[in-house]
Image: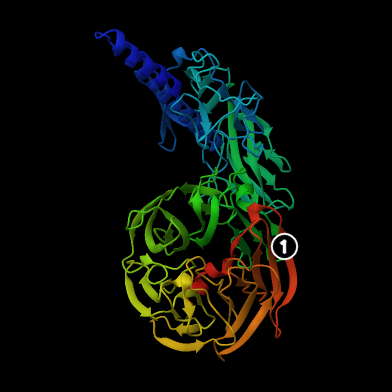
Amino acid sequence: MKQLFTLLAITLFGAATWSCSYDDDDLWKEIDGIKTQLAELNKEVSALQTLVDALRQSKTISDVTQTDTGYTITFNDNTSVSIADGKNGTNAPEVGIDLFEGGYYWTIGGKGNWLTDADGHKIPVAGKDGSKPEMAVDADGYWIVDGARIKDAAGNDVKATGSNGKDGDSFFKSVSDGDDAVTFTLTDGTEIVIPKTSVSSFCFVQPDDGRSYFVFDFGKKKTLTLNTTDVETADFMNIPEGWKASLNLAKNSVTVQAPAASDAAYSGGIITLIGIDKKGNTVFASADVCASVDYTDKDGTFVVCEGNMTSVNGMLVYYDKAGKEYREVFEQANGGLEIGNVVQDMFMANGKIYLLTQNGDRMGGAGRFVVCDARTMRMEFADPLVFKTPEDKDTWPQHLVVVSATKAYIQYSDSSMESTSGIVALTLGENSVQIGATLEGTFGAFTSVGAIKTRMVYSRGKIYAGCGHSVVIINAESGTVEKRLTYEGRQVKGIVKGVDGNIYFALAGTYSGTSPNMGTLTSDPMIVGIDHSGTVVSEKELSGGVRFPIATWSPAIGMCASFTDPYLYFVDTDAFNATSATRYNYQTQTVDYKYLSGNETIYGIMGQHPTTNVLWVGKSSYVDSNIYTYDVSGTSASEINHFYYPTQKGASPAGIDFVYRFSEAYINK
């Protein structure tokens, strides 16, 4: 299209030079026609995805209405899709679809020639979780998937309108409205047959847990119920690899067994039955099945890895109560899709896992705000979460709390050197999010006023957050700051909840100088404890060489609290590459200086496991990472184990987290 406009510009310039009576109406009509053609093709992509998704979910068609431009198809769940008349669909587009193991995937250049992503995975027409890869046509008339142009075998961009730019004008050749089913025939001959809602019914009874798929524990069996009205014979058309299934048509049931556990955290696919009813019609029934680690297990441990902001997306790693490691758990559950770039934080609530990334989908990831089923990690939706600061600057979302099914809060900084920061409210809907205003009293230069780059504490209906030299207490329901505790000249470095239910925060020492970056410390750092009303219950200055950073490039100290003992752990030096941590007992106000030390840089928020009491610490060289576990029952930390993440995808562990932190028992403690 860009070349077309260049030629048009030359043509129009020539016309202006050699003829004052040039009429360009026909030329612009042609341009408008091309734009219309591309828009229509994008609509057909969406319609095709809707049909495949309906087939995957075992929907039936309740109504077929012919319109001036084609057909309106209404499904049994009252959703609908418009299918354009296929009278011009005589030639197949270069990109098509084909069936593989019970699911439809995109092809290029003919059946069996699978279109793959950067990692070689087939790209589903409709994802296992109902999500749809962003297959579309760009403004220049080329196929794109998730914003990137598709390449053919020779490495060339693929035109949406065929190799010569004229054929391949439609996906759909015809729509046949039969007595018992509607057949959608594509221009490459592929047929998609969806049964009509009628007396003859052949489908799986949907799960009673509200999901659109069946969840299994590894190695376990379940009996699924079938609707088999007027179906006389049936057999399996597809069973996912590793799964077992047996049909008892007389009892309207299918017994399914999930595969045994393996190194993978996920296994699943589509079980498809093909049947013949009393009229001789062919009917289909499909069930989406999933075997998964249970990510809601109270003893589970997560490691949030940022990745690299310039080269690779981050990942989420999970450890079960036996210490078994599962890497890239989001990717496994979502067909290879990655979370996003610079993964920052997570929160579990409302049966969901909420993931936050700083740079979102810039490298083909899901987005900035990603919502998953907490049991299986299957993505439910993702949002780009684009918003501005009160000064109209771009933002980086960094930490979150989710306080109800409809409300969440995000700490953010501006994306220009993180010089300002704040907290913004989100309104959550069904697969949607609305961004509200920055909370009054949380925005400004983070060195003195703005929200600090570390986790907030959600406890008993209130949010406790560090904001520059202050800690603010926010009413979680209204989003208003109810109280502010200010320690003038001292930056807040971390805030946590103790085993006694009180809130503890770390303060840097006061400093002299023209700016935090160039300042000189003039007093020791401090640990302060407050109750839920904000009343100070303890203060302790830390001597012994503990120094908290005051520079803008190092806002936090990886601080964590034990769930079972009165201990806090935190980095104890203002060096950018800190290698040691101190332990503080807030009951006795005793300090174990340099309790943990080594040669590697401690990175991100540490964590002590709620049942094993093992301390988890992330260490990073920015191109890879080690996650260490320590026995902290003695006078110094003793290494138990470590897990090596050899690639940049596992680099920079933003934080260790535990399922227990999100439990009602802990939040209401």
Q: Position of residue 22 (x, y in %)?
A: 27, 9
Q: Residue furthest bottom?
A: 588
Asked whether residue 13 appears in the rendered view, the answer is: yes
- Give the camera-side residue of 191 and 354: 354
Q: Is residue 124 above or below residue 453?
A: above
Q: Residue furthest left?
A: 21
Q: Position of residue 590 (x, y in %)?
A: 59, 90
Q: Position of residue 547 (x, y in %)?
A: 55, 79
Q: How is the image coloured?
A: rainbow
Q: Position of residue 314 (x, y in %)?
A: 59, 53
- Give the camera-side residue of 427 and 268: 427
Left or right: 291 as drawn, with respect to 401: right
Q: Is residue 535 above or below residue 124?
A: below
Label 1 is placed on what type of residue?
Answer: Phe
Q: Which residue is mark 1?
A: 643
Residue found at x 40% / y 21%: 5
